[in-house]
Each structure stands twice: as structure tokens, then as C-alpha cells.
Amino acid sequence: MPLYIMLSTLTDDGMETLHEHPRRIKEVNQEVEKMGAKVLQQWAVLGPYDFVNLVEAPDNETIARVSVALGAR
């Protein structure tokens, strides 16, 4: 299956949620699986992005759907 790099940034509210509920990362990864993709690796980084994610998905349409769904939060 194809692999994709997804770059993520958190809003201030998202950062606060993560500090209060660190398991939220795993919950979001489970939501990604329900959309047909799978987070294989995830790294917290410094700079303009907060996370770099290695995601496996069957096709461009699936990863686009995941990206839009996560970006709309």
C-alpha cells in the first residue's frame, strides 16, 4: 500500500487538549483507521509543524479524505 507523509499543526485548543489528554493522539489515530488509512509512525517536531506522520493508505482519494477531515477540526 502507498505511504504518505502528513504534516500536522495544532491549534492552541488542540495543544491544550493534548496536554490534558495525551491519549487523544491514539484516539485520533484510531479515527484515521476508520477512514481507511493507518498511521505507521508519528514524530513530534519543532518548527512550523507539530507532527510528522507516516500514513499508509490505499490511494490518493483516501489520504485526501483523511487530510480534509483532520484539517477541518
Image (tube, rainbow, N blue to C red):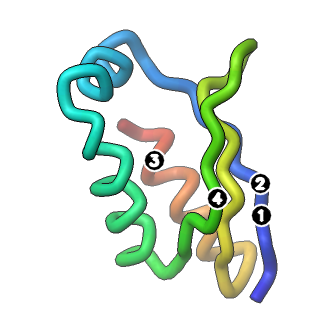
Q: CA distance from mark 1 to mark 3?
A: 15 Å
Circle nearer the N terminus (4, 2): 2
Which numbered mark, 1 or 3, is in the foreground of this view? Answer: 1
Q: Residue at x 70, y 59 (%)?
A: 54
Tell me whether the residue at label 2 lies in contact with that at label 1, contact meaning CB atoms closer than 8 angstroms.
yes
- Give x and y (percent) for residue 71: 49, 40
Residue at which label 3 appears: 70
Under mark 2, the amino acid is: Ile
Task: Give the spatial CA distance, label 3 vs label 2.
Answer: 14 Å
Q: Marks 1 and 4: which is nearer the front?
A: 4
**Disc 4 versus disc 2: distance between alpha carbons?**
10 Å
Mark 3–mark 2 CB contact (< 8 Å) = no
Please, what secondary structure does the residue beneath circle 4 have? strand
Quadrant in the rendering for residue 15: top left
Mark 1 and mark 4 lie on one chain; the one further toward the N terminus is 1
Label disc, if present, on residue 5 of the rendered structure: 2
**N-terminal of the two: label 3 or label 4?**
4
Badge number at residue 41: 4
Spatial separation of the CA atoms under disc 1 and disc 4: 11 Å
Q: CA distance from mark 2 to mark 1?
A: 4 Å
**Within-10-Å neighbours for mark 2: few <14, some 14–19, many 20+:** some
